[in-house]
Amino acid sequence: MNLPWRYDWGDFVALSYVWGDPSIRGEIYVNDVPMSVTANLESALRELRHHMRIQQGFYVWVDALCINQEDLDERAAQVGRMKEIYHTAWHVVIWLGPEADRSDLAMLALRYMSVESERGDVLSKLYKRVEFYVVRLPFMQWKHEHTVLQIRKGALNAIHHLLSRPYWRRLWIIQEVVLGSRNSPVLCGGSSILIRDIFKSLQVMQGDGDSLGQYVIMSARGTGNLKRKWSVKDDTYEISEKLWERPVAMAALQALDTNLSTTNRGVYDALLLSREAKATDERDRVYGILGLPHLARLVKIHPDYNRTAPQTFTLFSARLLSSGNLNGLRLVNSPVPPIGTRYLKTSHFSRPRKPRLIHRHRTIHRGCEHGLPSWVICWSCPRNPAQPFNNRSSTLPAFTSLPPPSPPQIENDRLLTVQGILFEELTNLSAFHATESSKLYPLSSPSPAPSPYGNRSSTRSALAHLLTGNDPSGPDPHLLLLPRLWETGIMTVDGNIFGVKDFFYRNRTLRLWDAWTIETLIREETKGQTIDRVRASASTAPRLRRITEGHRDALNTAMRMLAWRRLVTTESGYLALVPAASQAGDVIAVLSGCDAPLVLRPEIEGRYSVVGEAYVQWVTGGEVQQRLDKGICVLEDLCIC
């Protein structure tokens, strides 16, 4: 066909797909030469035959056919060109696999959600909430609430199976999708949709406080499996928020500008996506993201499959940190101390609710076991089970009164020297889990500091904002202050050991500040006051605080923030969430080039090791700058080993 081709030889589209089971093969012919390929690739090529671009004469670039996978040198050379290949392709064609599990219905439903999201409130067309009084008497009120789905459960089931396909967890698709267009076609069997429509529909799901996402999971896996999303032994991808959060994160990375103001965020998001992806070769966790625009401008590495995985990780971390971007330190793989994995826990409505007869203690996560320095991102070891903070943007102010920091220095691939500020030590620490083996926690210092947030009401508000992530688009933080959520929880939300109520009963004696423990801060009145109030109101109509969907969203967010982390205060009483490995005496530090505070542990000879990322609830956001201006803190060289 006589078309205005971009090249003398024609044009091409690049195929983005997952190889599939290598033992299931098919045979195709390339230039009349028979070649054995995986069954998934054969299906993709057969489907592409029917599409217009291929019939017009476009070539198809496929890694399995265009790269000799057995030749390490050729493989390394071609991997280095992936950015060029996918960026210059006329289209990146995404192949999810053959039609199965009503994938045609899923594609139609996602397209519908995308179109309706542009017209207005799409959620009202998917489900509605019904409320009515079961009992409404002067002395008793019982209001029932439930959800009526207006979208077929079969459609939700189909969406779940589509999002559970192996494609979405493949490492190389991060680069392929981000470098492609938002108009890239997505094929699944004989159905097609644009990638932007999938992104829009999943953003609707995420923006609903994850309620719609929970219906998607329950339609395919039932309600019982929702509790398993907190497990560290099982693969929880298909029963957790990762099902839609991962594609949404790729969409955000694709839409992100490549200017300097967004570089740090782009680098961190790329590292996070790579950390949670599946790869056959661990070295590809580095090589598979080198072509992303935000990383390509900072890290110059030529893929070399003759290097070992630890050598690759050390080289990549050194190059990234030397560029001045220290956000990789937020992904440090710190261990998780032992917990009791067997216990007796009474029913939801009876007291006491805390676990009893705790036994079979074991270490959940050992951290990096390859002997690498603490500043190296190790992708080979399982990641820390704590979920990343949803609000990834920095709340740290710029250091306006200081000259630009000197670039980090690395000595012998072991010692990293960076400039930063040591803020304060951790003094009061909660247990990170209801069955934590160590009896040391919760740990309160002999003389806790007063609350920097002010009176009890302001301090309660600070705690609620911390546990809901300070997200303006998230749940109302003050809904989390209802004492009932901490004392009894919500059966459908926290009917497991990770509930906020379990945290409360393990840590209620923790004194974070001089005036209050966790219990006296949360509870609005003493037991005696409660009895007096009940007696006084026995003859009047009760005023019930009804649990709403907002309470459920707030509780879900708090559980995610607290899981596998300690709630702590510093020397001056600042609240923070820190990794489970944190100990008293560890220091919260602010490093130049890192968008979030870090927890550092003092080691020998004035050195420090990185424990992990901290989430600090500031009062004004300008505390670090104020201390610099007053000379309380100084910008100094910190040696990290």
Image: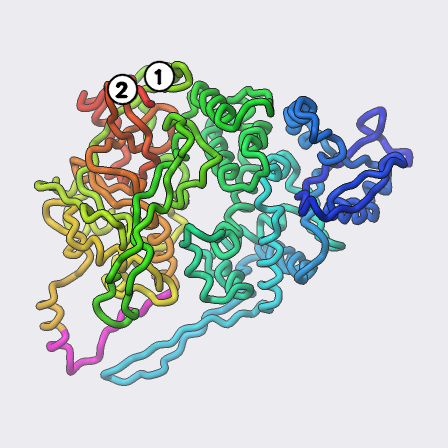
Span colored in magenta: 534-548
**536 within the magenta span:** yes
Regarding residue 435, the answer to whether it shows in the image is yes
The residue carrying mark 1 is: 405
- Report helix, strand or loop for mark 2: loop
The spot of residue 436 in percent (x, y) is 26, 50
Q: Disc 2 or 1, which lies upstream in sequence?
A: 1
Going 46% across and 24% down the picture, which residue do you hit?
314
**474 within the magenta span:** no
The residue carrying mark 2 is: 635
Q: Using the numbered discs, state the Cα–Cα distance from disc 2 to disc 1 in whole angstroms.
A: 9 Å
Q: Residues within 10 Å of mark 1 (few under 14, many from 20)?
A: some
Quarter of the rendering occupied by the N terminus: top right
Regarding residue 123, the answer to whether it shows in the image is no
Quarter of the rendering occupied by the C terminus: top left
Indicate the amino acid at tag 2. Leu
- Report helix, strand or loop for mark 1: loop
Say whether marks 2 and 1 touch (CB < 8 Å): yes
Q: Would you say 492 lies left or right of 441 here?
A: right
